[in-house]
Amino acid sequence: MTNPSVIQTWQQRPIIISGPCSAESEQQLLETAMALANTGKVSLLRAGIWKPRTKPGLFEGMGSIALQWLKLASTVTGMPTCVEVATAKHVEEALKMGVDVLWMGARTTVNPFSVQEIADVLKNTDVPILVKNPVNPDIELWTGAIERLQAANVKNIGMIHRGFSTYGDSKYRNAPLWHIPIEMKRRYPELLLICDPSHICGNRHLLQQVAQRSIDLGYHGLMIESHPNPDKALSDAKQQITPEDLLNILNNLVWRSEQSLEQEFVDALAKLRAQIDNLDEELLGLVSERMKLAEKIGEYKRDNNITILQTQRWNEILEKSIQKGIHLGLSPEFITRYFDAVHLESISRQNSVMYAKKEESK
Ligand code: PEP
Ligand code: MN
């Protein structure tokens, strides 16, 4: 059974997890832990012990011996601890050494065999486990990992958003793709959702803004890597910060709650939402009218053997709408996304119209 104080920590909001990317030595871990404890703001001490690295030859973590350092750091500071696990053996060793919370790394969530192995070893327990998003932007893999743990009756599951691999240059190490965690929050409103700005950003300069963005979206906490001497870190040096810099970031964040008890605010919000509901209803009606017209056009195209896709017409619509949108204060990106969705649906409707004709003439 998990220690009740860990469950209290787990339920704390915001929950702040920090510590080095990798435990490198007893001295480094103790120094980090004590500085973090002194901030009075960190709920859980993290450290990587078994590090899944992209290429061989890189620092792969200190392994099991570091569990003793973590235990010592916890005894000295009173902070519960958290490590990454990728196999049943990792889970068993970590729990035996008193680690309080586990997390599944992004390279593990992608592999259903590994996820199942971890679910099996945690079956029917209340050991808290945080599931990082998979490296690739596949929401069903992330959901699948949660479902495997739930099916094994693992009782304390949470999620960590650490961003997604993309090909080519980007200002982020892992693109946040915020719509994916937003959808996960919709699917699992009862699960803890933590943001890991360190692995999203890949550098320390963007941490503050990504952390704030996650709080604005109603995340329950943050996991940020810290190190007494970040530039000398054996892994993820560019994104780590000192415990002092962490405290600065935390102090500069605007924390928000999901609900307000202020009647004036509640009333004002309700009025604006009613207006939005009316406009949405109107928009739905208009989009439906538009689709009916597209179907009519589909019938003419069918009867005259004309292609469904008319690139020139499509370009005209898009360009005209982008220009109009700019005047109305709508971004070209949004207009393009909106019209792409509308256009794809029109094409699909017109396809159905053509297909229906074939069916009838059989
Ligand atoms: C980490 O937290 O140090 C780590 C390896 O993270 P991820 O699985 O997100 O790459
Ligand atoms: Mn790391």
Image (cartoon, rainbow, N blue to C red):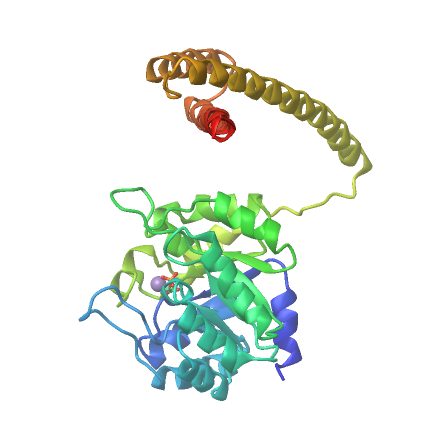
Horizontal and vertical percent for residue 299? 49, 17
Q: In the rendered image, which quarter contains the N terminus?
A: bottom right
Q: Nearer the viewer, residue 210 or 177?
A: 177
Q: Quadrant of residue 261?
A: top right
Instruction: State whether residue 42 appears in this view.
Output: no
**Which quadrant of the render holds ligand 1?**
bottom left
Horizontal and vertical percent for residue 316? 38, 11
Q: How many marks?
A: 0
In the image, residue 320 sits, relative to residue 125, either above or below, namely above
In the image, residue 164 sits, relative to residue 348, either above or below, namely below
- Return the residue found at the far right: 263
Q: Residue at x 62, y 72 (%)?
A: 155
Horizontal and vertical percent for residue 169? 25, 42
Q: Horizontally, is 204 left or right of 218 in the view?
A: left
Instruction: State whether residue 320 appears in this view.
Output: yes
Q: Quadrant of residue 158?
A: bottom right
Q: Nearer the viewer, residue 315 or 308?
A: 308
In the image, residue 132 sits, relative to residue 341, either above or below, namely below
- Return the residue found at the far front: 362
In the image, residue 248 sits, relative to residue 101, either above or below, namely above
Q: Nearer the viewer, residue 255 or 51?
A: 51
Q: Residue at x 57, y 45 (%)?
A: 217
Horizontal and vertical percent for residue 350? 47, 24
- Return the residue found at the far left: 57
Q: Residue at x 64, y 64 (%)?
A: 12
Q: Residue at x 40, y 50 (%)?
A: 137
